[in-house]
Amino acid sequence: MERLDKILAGTGRWSRREVKVLIRAGRVRVNGAVLCSPEEKIDRNATLLVDGEAVNGARFVYLMLHKPAGLLSATEDPRQPTVLELLPEPMRRIGLFPVGRLDKDTEGLLLLTNDGALAHRLLSPKKHVDKVYFVQVDGILDGADVHAFHQGMVLNGTTCLPAGLEVLSPPDQALITLHEGKYHQIKRMLAARGKPVVYLKRLSMGPLTLDPTLSPGGWRLLTPEELASLPMLDS
Ligand code: URA
């Protein structure tokens, strides 16, 4: 059971204030009956109509965003712009936050949600959710780098889990697969190999792959198929 105004505001279509006005004006039906009290608690699975139109009362919102360079993976910052600023105003009021961080200059796939439990499960080291990155370095990557990644590199005394390094052509480019997410991990691993990162982009995270039709700064809701592919949703 949850407050009617909270469920409606959680869709991101209206602000809390707008929702209260709609409800008090008798424009909202719950299981067919008009309800005029915003604070009334209703079943999450109730059928909701606003002006006769069905509203998806889904509690949580999940979206993929193509993070451009130059924005922080954070919800707010006193000095610098964050990825939340790419979203329209109502979407900024529903508690969305990025699941994991990309550095300010890193581009690519970022999942945003207001489902804290899912975020926790996706980031849990026990779940080993693979993340694949495209990288370009200042230098030439070779078999010794592949071996070092595979062995598990030691950064400041901490041994990383074995990581995948697939050298591309030209060999200053590669695909990297991480099974964990340490601070600046790829930059630190490649700096330790003497081949600093010049460009980094996340291509996938677990079953989610960056939609190639999204240009940097673009976003869209996850499809039902993508949502179903997140194995952690039901655990
Ligand atoms: N590794 C990094 O160094 N930076 C990122 O943004 C992601 C992984």
Image: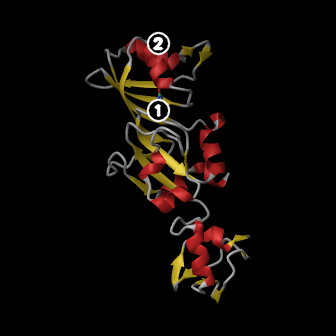
Mark 1 neighbour density, 10 Å: few (under 14) some (14–19) many (20 or more): some
Q: Residue 103 shows which numbered tag?
A: 1
Task: Give me the residue at 43% from left, 49% from top.
Answer: 65
Q: Residue at x 44, y 41 (%)?
A: 204
Q: How many marks?
A: 2
Q: Which residue is mark 2?
A: 192
Q: Could you tell me residue 26's position as x and y percent? A: 60, 87
Q: Amino acid at mark 1?
A: Asp
Expressed as whole percent of the image width and height from the top left, the position of residue 53 reads 50, 82
Residue 122, relative to residue 224: is it above or below? above
Earlier residue among tags 1 and 2 = 1
Does mark 1's beta carbon lie closer than 8 Å to ligand 1? yes
Above or below, 175 relative to 62 = above
| Secondary element at tag 2 | helix
Secondary structure under tag 1 reads loop
Residue 143 pos. (x, y %): 38, 14
